[in-house]
Image (cartoon, rainbow, N blue to C red):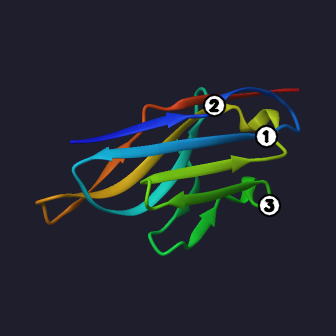
Amino acid sequence: QVQLVESGGGLVQAGGSLRLSCAASGSIFSINTMGWYQQAPGKQRELVAAITSGGSTNYADSVKGRFTISRDNAKNTVYLQMNSLKPEDTAVYYCKTRIRIAGYPKEYDYWGQGTQVTVSS
């Protein structure tokens, strides 16, 4: 019913930049909050940044001032611009969106497949 396709991960040197994208498609009636999470090896998945349908944002303290989350509602896409990357940012990044499917009254959370970000020192 809903598919999330992530792109933009890769290998970058410390201080470099990457831009992640996550596009939602399917029988979508509306999209509420969209967010990005990171999961490093041996660690729990943690929120990096989120953006509401109205454009309000929140960030983990570790990325404030370096990462920027944005969304294009016409394209059902959320982005994560990552600047000044550090080796400790290395993780698999997942997008999560809260979506209401056409014909259903409730919202559900959907996860992307994850994209690897590796920052070398």
Percent x, y of residue 86? 82, 38
* 34 and 26: which is toward the camera: 26
| Mark 1 closeness class: few <14, some 14–19, many ≥20 residues within 10 Å | some
Label 1 secondary element: loop
Earlier sequence position, callout 1 versus callout 2: 2
Q: Of tags 3 and 2, which is closer to the observer?
A: 2
Q: Residue at image x 49%, y 36%?
A: 6
Towards the viewer: 109 or 53: 53
Spatial separation of the CA atoms under disc 1 and disc 2: 10 Å
Tell me the kind of residue under disc 1: Ser
* Mark 1 touches mark 3? (CB < 8 Å): no
Confirm or deny contact between disc 1 and disc 2 (CB under 8 A): no
Q: Which residue is mark 3?
A: 65
Left or right position of 85 against 107: right
The quarter of the picture where the C terminus appears is top right
59 to 3, vertically: above or below: below
Would you name the residue on which mark 1 appears? 17
Please tell me which residue is depicted at 80% across the width and 40% down the height of the picture: 85
State whether residue 52 appears in this view.
Answer: yes
Whole-percent x, y for residue 74 in the image? 43, 60
For this view, does 109 lie left or right of residue 120? left
Instruction: Name the residue located 21 percent from the left edge and 50 percent from the top edge.
Output: 27
Reading the image, the residue beneath label 2 is 9
Q: Earlier in the sequence, mark 1 or mark 3?
A: 1
Q: Give the left or right position of residue 13, taking residue 48 as reference.
A: right
- Residue 99 appears left or right of 56: left
Could you tell me how many numbered marks the image carries?
3
Q: Amino acid at mark 3?
A: Gly
Q: CA distance from mark 3 to mark 2?
A: 20 Å
Amino acid bearing label 2: Gly
